[in-house]
Each structure stands twice: as structure tokens, then as C-alpha cells.
Amino acid sequence: MTLNDRVERIVDELDKKKGEEIEVFNLDNVDYIAKRVILVNSLNGKHSFSLLGHLKDKLKPLGEEFLQIDESEDWIVIDMGDILVHIMSPEYRQKYLLEEFLTDITNRKDS
């Protein structure tokens, strides 16, 4: 399975469980810790943990590895090696502006 297939599967699973504003950043040509970053909004803290649990339940049996997970109600980061998944409350997503950071580093590679 290709990296893009894996990302698509993760996005599909997040979407099935009502993850909102899902964005994928391709960082193949950037010196960054992952090749893809997925951002998704949760509805609340319980929903964040529910999304995490759903991903584990669906993806681990398919061979996906969850190398590290940092959890809080407002922000969960899942390190899957070449993929990072950020499950965030809308407030944290707006506060930390990861989209701007990721867009900036992606655009810098073209400069």
C-alpha cells in the first residue's frame, strides 16, 4: 500500500466518525519529521478520544503502527512514522495555526 493510499484510508476513517475540516499536507520535498501531516477538527474532548480510538481499532489490524501518541482533550498528536495526525479542537487549531506553518514550509521548498 502506498503512502497516499494509507493517508486516504486515515482520512476516510476520520470522515466516517465526523472529523471536520480535514486537511492533508504533502511534505515529501521538505526537511520535516514526516512525509504527510493530517489535520482534523474534533467536536470536543470526548470526540477527540473517540477519533483516536477509532483509528487504532481500524488501522492497527491493517498493520499501521502508532509509534507515539500525545493526548489531551484539545490536541492529540499521532506519530505513525511517515504520517503525523493532529486531532485538534477548533480553538486550538485556530490558536496554533498549523496550516499556516505547514503551508509556509511547503512553499519555501519552491523558492
Image (cartoon, grey):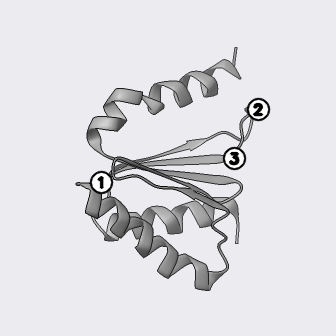
- The residue labelled by disc 1 is 42
| Left or right position of 82 against 43 | right
Disc nearer the start of the sequence (1/3): 3
Mark 1 and mark 3: Cα distance apart in space: 23 Å
The amino acid sitting under disc 2 is: Asp
Q: Residue at x 63, y 67 (%)?
A: 66
Q: Which residue occupies the foreground of this view, 73 or 84?
A: 73
Q: Which residue is mark 3?
A: 35
Residue at the location (41% across, 28% down)? 97
Image point (43%, 66%), residue name: 52
Screen quadrant of the N terminus: bottom right
Q: Is residue 90 left or right of residue 53?
A: left
For marks 2 and 1 on the same chain, the one whose residue lies earlier in the sequence = 2
Residue 23 drawn at (x, y percent)? 44, 45
Q: Nearer the viewer, mark 2 or mark 1?
A: 1
Q: Are marks 2 and 3 in contact (CB under 8 Å)?
A: no
Which structural element holds mark 2?
Answer: loop
Question: Between tags 1 and 3, which lies in front?
Answer: 1
Q: Position of residue 85 (x, y in %)?
A: 52, 53
Q: Is residue 44 above or below residue 54?
A: above
The answer to whether marks 2 and 1 mark residues whose Cβ atoms lie closer than 8 Å is: no
> Label 2, on which residue?
31
